[in-house]
Amino acid sequence: MRHETPTRLKTLLYGLLCLLCVPFVFPTWWMVTSSFKPVGEIFAFPPRLLPADWDVSAYGQVFRLQPFAGQYLNSLYIALVVTAGTMAVAAMAGYAFARIRFPGQNVLFVVVLLGLLIPSEVTIVPLFQMFHRLGLTDTHWPLILVPVLGAPSVLATFIMRQFFISLPGELEEAARVDGLGRFGTFYRVALPLARPALGAVAIFTFLHSWNLYLEPIVYLSSPERFTLPQALTQFVDAYGGPMWNVQLAAASMTALPVLVVFVLAQRQFIEGLAHTGLKG
Amino acid sequence: MTGRADVRPVTRGNATGRTGGTGSGRPLWTVRRRDNLVGYLLITPQLLGSVLFVLLPLGLVLWYSLHEWNVLAGTFEFVGTENYDRLLADANLREVLAGTAVFSAGLVVFNLALALLLAILLNQRLRGTTFFRTVFFSPVVVSLVAWTIVWQFLLQDDGGVNGLLGAAGVDGPNWLRGEGTAMSAVIVVQVLKNVGLNMVLFLAALQGVPAQLYEAAALDGAGAWTRFRRITVPLISPTILLTSIITVVGSLQVFAQIAVLTQGGPGMSTTVLVYYLYQQAFQFHHFGYGATLSVLLFAIVALLTVVQWRMRRKWVIDET
């Protein structure tokens, strides 16, 4: 707290920080390096930080054992559609709740906010039944429609509303004087200003969709429709035991691209996620 | 749109120039009405979604919970409160709820303590803080199942953790198969995954504490611990409450970690409520009882939220 931290204390603090890094960095390191180890080396003792024999065969097996490329595409396109859809839905609703006064507004806002109180696990049984009756199980529709329109997008709407409330009213009056209608004001004036909030919404929505696990395993049954989290757990041998190097290769391919984007844009990620209070 | 006579004449006066063309003294499309329409249109997708995918399922879950419903047998009959009687008599459920309580409590305490420790370390005006912040935050963006699979691998009897312990001369247990160790293992894996979020929230709160307070306290002879207890904790108490709410509610939703790491075992030692719900509904096909467990989960989350918001009046100081 003093302006000059004494050198000995500094060394101690750095030592502590580096030690604390181990459980955060080691798993990712271990995942990537072990995916390049031949089966015989995977549980070698003492553990080796780098493979003695680099072996890329696990990466080939990932694609042979499952339609992994298709599963990757499933996850990617679902996450992108959900992200774009959520941004649109949340920006529109957030703007209306923040800047337009219309009868019944408060009641309707409370109705929408209820979604924040209800964990998606509570409604999974009836939602499964609804989609089952519509013949939409084993399709991607429930994984897209529910997040975009249902409870998961409510947090996004809330964040957008908080942002739009903070916009100065003069901007809109100016837009009005210039002859823009309500919708034009929203689309041409307010929305471009909302980029930071939209960015935060995009980041947490993408990660949420990318990580979804309970919903895919409930709704989907055909391997070619699986999403990544579900596919990762399917690399098992004839006895049901995990094929570690293959599983870790698939896990690496799932985790690393997002991790790279994160490192490149860590400030936007951290601020975006922290300010929106992303849950579990 | 009716009963607001005080507003109408004003808006009509405003609007005549814009609505032009209707000719009559009461134009149909006043600015206010057009605004209302745009407002309703803009909220329609979200509102429709809330009704279809939140309120309707919530109502259905209550309705289903009053029925005996076995999908495999094709039975669906009204049984009144029978499922709730079963809930009260379910010996497994008692074990599940105890496990859930241990899991949530352990998770919150460990998560908040570690998050605060990391935030305090990062708040020491050292160089390279951004690097460490990125490291501690990085698991948040790692795919949840990928993270869990790696830890499953690390925690095998002959896995990386025991390898490291063995290199230090310690004989580690089979973490995921031991009654006592499985729960702790799941908690630690989950905390490491998400502690970065709470850490960042704490860091922002710490940076908002005025430095003069610490200086004045130091002049008065207050030691580091006293300053922490008397200045830091009270001033960041709103953040402590916020993070504890997020973390408790989040802990009740933990599913993938359990499904991948332990499948609720050994025995039922790591079967938390959500996992039990999933088993009953989607593995044993007891949809009626699954719905009843959903109602219980909802009641617990609602109760916790109310309790925590009440607490904030008691022990959180001024939030402005």
Image (cartoon, rainbow, N blue to C red):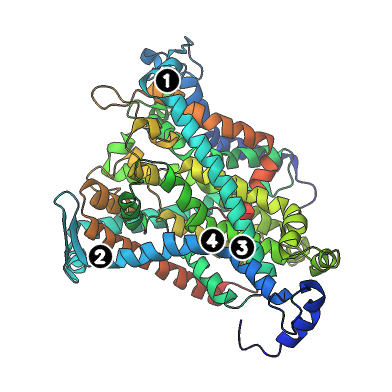
Q: Given this view, does label 4 or label 2 mark the residue nearer the observer?
A: 4
Q: Are marks 1 and 3 in contact (CB under 8 Å)?
A: no
Q: How many marks?
A: 4
Give the CA separation, mark 1 to mark 2. Answer: 43 Å
Find residue B205 and report its image quarter: bottom right
At label 1, the amino acid type is: Phe
Q: Residue at x 61, y 51 (%)?
A: A87
Front residue of this view, candidates A155 and A69: A69
Q: Are marks 4 and 1 in contact (CB under 8 Å)?
A: no
Q: Residue at x 80, y 50 (%)?
A: A3
Q: Chain of mark 2?
A: B
Give the CA separation, mark 1 to mark 3. Answer: 44 Å
The answer to whether any part of residue B195 appears in the image is yes
The circle on residue A63 is 1
Residue B267: image x %, image y %?
Answer: 22, 45
The residue carrying mark 3 is: B42
At label 2, the amino acid type is: Ser
The residue carrying mark 2 is: B65
Q: Secondary structure at mark 1?
A: helix
**Taking B318 as reference, is A108 left or right?**
left
